Image (cartoon, rainbow, N blue to C red):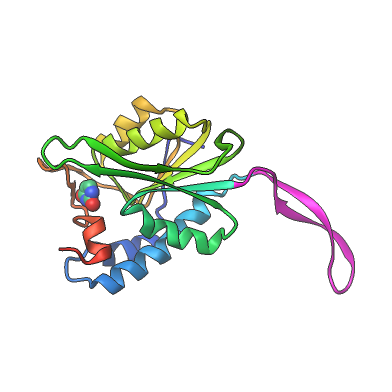
Amino acid sequence: MKHLTIVDHPLVQHKLTLMREKDTSTASFRQLLREISLLLAYEITRDLPVTSKRIETPLVEMDAPTIEGKKLVLVSILRAGNGLLDGILELIPAARVGFVGLYRDEDTLEPVQYYFKVPKNLEDRTVIAVDPMLATGNSSVAAIDLLKQAGATDLRFLCLLAAPEGVERMRQAHPDVPVITAALDERLNEKGYILPGLGDAGDRMFGTK
Ligand code: URA
């Protein structure tokens, strides 16, 4: 997989535009995020290895495709990651789930860890870390650092919006981790928000502002 994949599907782009609009309600924002996360999950799992198994249809036996091997682990980078997580779990209900609690210090923009809980045997699994906003890249890089320390070797990062600064930071720190996003925006502002962006993803999905 390439280091950066932008999912420029018309449905994704249309829904993202609705999410960016400042007057979109919390309920609509949440619903749209859920819908987009299904479409992004479809893309991020596109290259999962497939094997076949013998099944019986009501008419005949056949060798039918089935996803091979490793159990997927989804890791939500709290709290905004949970919005993406819920949608993906609808599509991949058997996935294991982990959480990394990081918040961004608004003055230094550095990530501060407050929670870390992931499934065992990460080294045997494909791990998809999810966070809607890849802004400075500080928290994403820190989350991937922690997941690698916990044993993960096969990692992907899924977000909704990325800033060039964050993509570059991830590419330098973790060139082995593909980034999948719905859009690559223009830049960060002085407070570390993505422009044009959609504001604070957590606040918009949880209605906390
Ligand atoms: N986090 C957000 O929620 N929004 C941004 O624009 C940047 C980081």
Residue at the image position 88 percent from the left and 73 percent from the top? 59
Q: Quadrant of residue 31?
A: bottom left
Residue 150 visible in the picture:
yes
Residue that sits furthest to the right in the current view = 60
Q: Is 95 covered by the magenta stretch?
A: no
Does 110 appear above or below 77? above
Residue 38 visible in the picture:
no
Residue at the image position 37 percent from the left and 37 percent from the top? 143
Q: Look at the image and give the residue range highlighted in magenta.
A: 49-71
Does 30 appear above or below 183? below
Q: Quadrant of residue 114?
A: top left
Q: Which is more toward the observer, 129 or 98?
A: 98
Q: Measuring from the top left, give residue 63's x and y in whole percent.
A: 83, 56
Looking at the rendering, in which quadrant would you find the C terminus?
bottom left
Residue that sits furthest to the top in the current view = 172
Q: Measuring from the top left, give residue 186's x and y in whole percent.
A: 21, 44
Q: Measuring from the top left, give residue 189's x and y in whole percent.
A: 12, 43
Q: How many numbered badges does the structure rendering display? A: 0
Residue at the image position 28 percent from the left and 63 percent from the top? 205
Q: Is 63 covered by the magenta stretch?
A: yes
Q: Which is more toward the observer, 17 or 96?
A: 96
Q: Measuring from the top left, give residue 45's x and y in whole percent.
A: 55, 49
Residue at the image position 49 percent from the left and 54 percent from the top? 41
Q: Quadrant of residue 54?
A: bottom right
Chief secondary structure of the magenta portion: strand
Q: On the picture, is 34 further left or further right than 24?
A: right
Q: On the picture, is 131 further left or further right than 155?
A: left
